[in-house]
Image: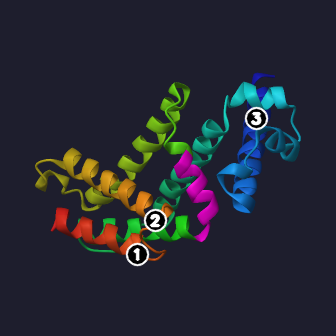
């Protein structure tokens, strides 16, 4: 019985995230209204609030899901390149293209990432941990990460540059298509 309940809860959360993502794709951050998410997912509004206290938490859950999916896809299709810099560049370009394919959704999730809501902190930490793990795994793809004295520092700086590039792109400072190139340049500078 517990397994069935867990599966039902997981399926319900999946529907909620899919509904929020669809609404964001249609109209961005402002289009994600909790009542509309509940209606589209065919769940009671109270059920939605039991899982996610705000639209920011819901959008962050969608972002966490995307980060986890990226990590799974990298296992299925490892990054190209013989050096850590080439592999990290490939991953960051692929991730950037994925974000740029759904600009309204990406911008909505990024807006949610900027929330100061205390209850959103665990989801933000989950996203950060997954993205840092992706970069660290890619750097260590050849098992020689010990050649970098400060791997954690490199991963932290690349994560910060990624966040900055997302900021520039979502605010219209940099056009689509440049984020991946800028991130690849940062990876080359840090890892070569």
User: Which of the two residues, 181 or 133, is positioned nearer the viewer here?
Assistant: 181
Please tell me whether mark 3 or mark 2 is closer to you in this view: 2
Q: Is residue 10 left or right of residue 57?
A: right
How many neighbours does mark 3 have within 10 angstroms: few (below 14), some (14-19), or many (20 or more)? Answer: few
Q: Is residue 165 above or below residue 176?
A: above
Label 1 to label 2, Cα distance in Å? Answer: 8 Å
Q: Are marks 1 and 2 in contact (CB under 8 Å)?
A: yes
Q: Label 2 crowding class (10 Å Cα cut-off): few <14, some 14-19, many 20+? A: some
**Numbered circles on residues, count:** 3
Residue on which the image places disc 3: 7
Stretch of the chain drawn in magenta: 101-111
The answer to whether residue 110 is magenta is: yes
Per the image, the residue denoted by label 2 is: 169
Residue 10, position as x, y percentages in the image: 72, 37
Is the C terminus in the top left, top right, bottom left or bottom right quadrant? Answer: bottom left
Give the mark, 1 or 2, whose residue is nearer the N terminus: 2
Which residue is found at the position 44% from the left and 36% from the top?
A: 125
For the residues bearing labels 3 and 1, Cβ distance under 8 angstroms: no
Q: Secondary structure at mark 2?
A: helix
Q: Position of residue 15 (x, y in %)?
A: 78, 45
Q: Find residue 171 and report its horizontal and vertical position in percent.
A: 48, 61
The local secondary structure at tag 3 comes to: helix
Label at residue 178: 1
């Amino acid at each position: 019985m517990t397994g069935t309940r867990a599966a039902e809860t997981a399926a319900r959360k999946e529907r909620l995230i899919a509904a929020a993502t669809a609404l964001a794709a249609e109209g961005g951050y402002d289009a994600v209204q909790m009542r509309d998410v509940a209606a589209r997912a065919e769940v009671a509004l109270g059920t939605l609030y039991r899982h996610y206290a705000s639209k920011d938490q819901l959008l962050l859950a969608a972002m966490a899901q995307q980060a986890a999916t990226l990590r799974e896809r990298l296992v299925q299709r490892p990054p190209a390149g013989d050096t850590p810099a080439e592999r990290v560049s490939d991953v960051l370009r692929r991730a950037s293209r994925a974000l740029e394919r759904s600009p309204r959704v990406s911008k909505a999730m990024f807006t949610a990432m900027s929330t100061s809501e205390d209850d959103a902190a665990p989801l933000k930490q989950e996203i950060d941990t997954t993205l840092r793990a992706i970069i660290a795994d890619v750097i260590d793809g050849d098992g020689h990460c010990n050649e970098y004295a400060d791997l954690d520092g490199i991963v932290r700086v690349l994560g910060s540059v990624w966040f900055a590039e997302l900021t520039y792109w979502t605010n219209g400072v940099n056009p689509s298509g440049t984020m991946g190139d800028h991130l690849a340049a940062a990876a080359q500078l840090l890892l070569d």
